Amino acid sequence: MKTLVVYTSKNGYTLECAKKIGEGLRENGHEADLKDAKKEARKADLSQYDSVIIGGGIHAGRLPGAVRRYCAANEAALRTKRLGLFICGTDVEHQEKQFSDNYPQSLLDVAVAKGWFGGRIVFAEQSAPMRFMLKKILKGAEDVHEERIEAVGDFLNRLISG
């Protein structure tokens, strides 16, 4: 199985997850190409892939525009692939809503695997305006660590066997 992993990462955690997915696919004897949705993913020929995995980090309730645009531009082709969708974010309680708010329903309906890999907010990595907003939203300036990178394994099992 040849798989395209399309992602966008702002502060690095989504990239870590995409790399972990690629490693897991390769360990299971599959080919994996990682492509940033902001750059080279737009040029990838989907006919060359059996599976496509798409993901990004949630910021203010939304996936990055590049991921949403990629899904919209390739929706018909993606529905014909073995599809996996993932989200990185710290709002565990609303993960199902975040999937439904950020991915087209037609893709959610055909996805064989959906994964929530948690996330992190490190204040030192944020711009001054973002730190200000996050302090208000989170009612403090403590870093948030909700990483669930171990969920990648279950996600891959569902994708490969599902």
Image (cartoon, grey):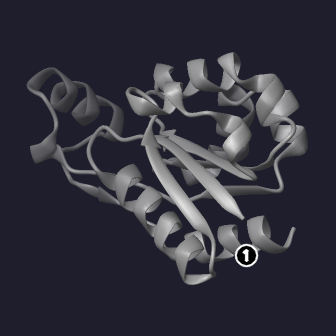
The residue located at (40%, 51%) in the rendering is 14
Report the number of numbered marks: 1
Residue 2 x %, y %: 66, 59
Residue 12 x %, y %: 28, 50
Residue 64 x %, y %: 46, 26
Query: Is residue 146 among what the camera can see?
Result: no
Residue 105 vertical placement versus 8 (above, below): above
Residue at which label 1 appears: 157
Q: Identify the element where label 1 is drawn.
A: helix
Q: Is residue 120 left or right of residue 5?
A: left
Residue 55 x %, y %: 55, 44
Quarter assignment of residue 74 = top right
Quarter assignment of residue 54 = top right
Query: Is residue 23 among what the camera can see?
Result: yes
The residue located at (67%, 70%) in the rendering is 156
Q: Is residue 29 left or right of residue 1?
A: left
Callout 1, which amino acid?
Asn
Q: Is residue 76 left or right of residue 18?
A: right
The residue located at (87%, 67%) in the rendering is 162
Residue 152 vertical placement versus 121 (above, below): below
The residue located at (82%, 48%) in the rendering is 111
